[in-house]
Structures are given as C-alpha cells and as structure tokens.
Amino acid sequence: MRTLIHKIKEAIAGTDFILLLFCVAASIFGIVMVYSATRPAMAEGETVPRDARAMFLAVAIGLVIALAISFIDYNFITKLFPFIGAVCIGMMALLFFIGVGPQERPDAKTWLMVPGTTFFFQPSELMKIGFIITYGMHLELVRDKLDRLFHLVLLLVHAAVPAGLVLLSGDMGSALVFLFIAAVMLFCAGVRLRWFLLGGAAVIASAPFVWRFVFDAVQKDRILGLIYPERYADIMLQQNRGMTAITSGGLTGMGLFHGTLTQIDNAIPEAENDMIFTCIGEELGLIGCAAALGLIVAVVLRCVHIGRRSKAGGTSLMCYGFAAMLAFQTVVNVGMCLMLLPVVGITLPFFSAGGSSNLCVYIGIGLILSIYRFDRETEAVSFRIGNLTPFSNY
C-alpha cells in the first residue's frame, strides 16, 4: 500500500501542472468563443453547436492522450522516430487517393474521413508533431556535422518532404509552418548564421518563380488585396469584416454572445476557425484579446523552459520546435485578422475550432510533459536504436 501511495505521489510530482493549467484554460476559453461564434448557425433543436461539441470532444480526448503519453519515457518515443515519420508520410500520401476538400476549396484535398463516422481528420496536423520528433532526432544524430554541406542538404530535404506534401495537397499555410519549425530548430541546434543568410538570399531570389508557378490566383489576390484593398473588395470581405468586429469591440467588448457581427450567421466567414480572434475582439475587447494571447505566450514560454532544462539535446530541440509551431501559427493568425498578412488558412492554437488541430496540439503537449517528467530523475539519454522500453522504472 505504501509503495502504491509513493508511486502515486511520484506520478503527481512528475506532472507539469503549470503547463497543463495554461493549456486547459486556453482550451476552455477557445470552446466558449467557438460556441459563441457558431450559435447563430445552430440547427433547430440543437443546444450546443456541432463545432463546439467537436472541439470539446477533441480537447477531452487530447488531454487524456497527453496524460497517457506523459507516462511514457520520451527515450522510447524518440527511438521510434523512423516509424513515426513513415506513418505521418503514409497518411499524407493517402490524401492524394481518398482525400476530400471543403466545399469552398474542393481542390484542397487536406482531409481524410474517419471510417464509420461523419468526422474528418487532417493528417498535416499530426505530421507537424511527427516532424518535430523526427527533425529533432535528425539534428541530434548529426549534431557534430552541422557545418558540413552534405548534412545541411539532407536536413533541408527532410524539411522539404513534409512541406512539399502539404503544399501539393493544397494547404500552403501548413507548409509555411513546417519551414518555420525547421528554421528555428536548425538555429537552436547551432547552424551558423552564414547558412541562414544564404538561405534568405535564395528565398528572395526564388520569389518571382514562386509568385508565377506556386501561388494560385486566389493566393495572389489575397496578397494584392492587402496593397490595393479597394480593388479586391470581394476577396478582402472576410478580413474587412473581421477588422470591423475587432475595432468595434474597443477595450472591453460588446459582451459575450452579444457581438454584432459574431452573432450573425456567416457575417464573418470562418469566424469559428481562422477568424476566431475577431470574435474575441468584438465580444471581449482588447482585454479579451490580451488574455487569449497571454495564455498562448505562457504555453510557449513554458515549453521553452522545459526545453532549456532538458538533459538531451534532441528533446530540447523538440520543445523549441513545438514552441515555434505555436508561436508562428499565433503570429500569422492574428496578422491575418488584423489585415497585416494575407489569409493562408492557419488556425489559432487552442482557440480555433477543429478537432484535428486541437487533438494534435495535445499530442504534442503530451511529448513535452514526458520530457518534463523523465528529465527530473534520469541522466542524458542515448539515442541509439535498441533496447526499447516504453516505461521507466521510476
């Protein structure tokens, strides 16, 4: 009995409740805002909108998965990186055969239907977590050779594979997320600045090619709309109305469930997804926006803190990569809502509706929790594949 009580106490002590608190608080905040944004579109007889129900279910399942992962030694998880990478690439490949797209973008085959249900899953969200694991392992395995061109090329190819698959499926926003994660992890791994300068020059030099051959007509119009909003009134409707909602909220907002535009069905297209920040601004004002961003920043900083105290270089990079993913998506999403950036279909972590994104964020949180737990008592980990043991004997 004493042994059981001791193990329970150790399990509780090994859980990062600070990170969990920030995540759960952000998710509850997000579910409430999604509920508010989708109330006007509720079907007759519904008491809770479908998007809010799906988000609650995804967060609940994700939280259970995160806690379960937190008890699995990250050394076991990271040793499975070839399998993790293969599964993620396989799921992305399925999109080209059985993928489906939304009604407004049928060409964007970014979803898989879950067999036997009416739910859809977006493999690119899971691939983000898989990429963070595999890229962290790749960097750790070549950490003494990072200045060699051959290994840098291999690392660039590693990043280009998931980014390219996602781009081919029609999701440019997620492709940008992969590239940013890779850049941050390369920088934190110690790749010299000159390589980043060369990379930046290559990006600038390739811009005309990307504009002509990669961007489609809609993507070009969204960029031009920021420069000439009066010429692209139709394409800028979503962002114009979003800005109207944010500015009308003022300091304290119009009140929860009382937003003028938020409470009109489809007044702000994708209000519960890409534009959820506009709903927060209209109904809860600047104070609500600051609270939402504050929770995300707290999660990001906590992940960075756990990465800094990690005893294994690869897992440190994974923490930084996950933090970079959350930070990048937040900056781009808010930039879209404030008409500083074009719409590229990137969700606001913890706040936007979407079962896939919320579920996979918590899978990533589970990895961070595992790193926190098992770095408390273990020495630096060997990343050689062999002697796989899923649970430590702590």
Image (cartoon, rainbow, N blue to C red):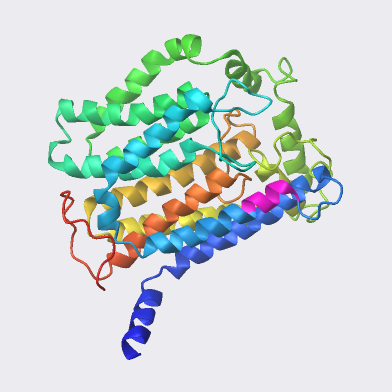
Q: Give the main secondary structure of the magenta stretch.
A: helix
Can residue 261 be seen from the camera position used here? yes
Instruction: Quadrant for residue 203, please give it.
Output: top left
* Highlighted range, magenta: 49-55
Q: Is residue 70 above or below residue 276?
A: below
Q: Is residue 202 above or below residue 46?
A: above
Q: Is residue 89 left or right of residue 99?
A: left
| Residue at 37% in and 38% down | 87
| Residue at 79% in and 35% down | 266
Q: Is residue 48 above or below residue 168?
A: below
| Residue at 35% in and 27% down | 161
Q: Quadrant of the N terminus?
A: bottom left
Q: Is residue 340 above or below residue 190?
A: above
Viewer-nearest residue: 152 or 3: 3
- Say whether residue 210 is magenta: no
Viewer-nearest residue: 227 or 324: 324
Residue 48 in percent (x, y) is at 76, 54
- Say whether residue 54 is magenta: yes
Residue 74 in percent (x, y) is at 29, 57
Q: Residue furthest bottom?
A: 2
Q: Is residue 82 left or right of residue 144?
A: right
Residue 359 in percent (x, y) is at 52, 50
Q: Is residue 202 left or right of residue 219?
A: left
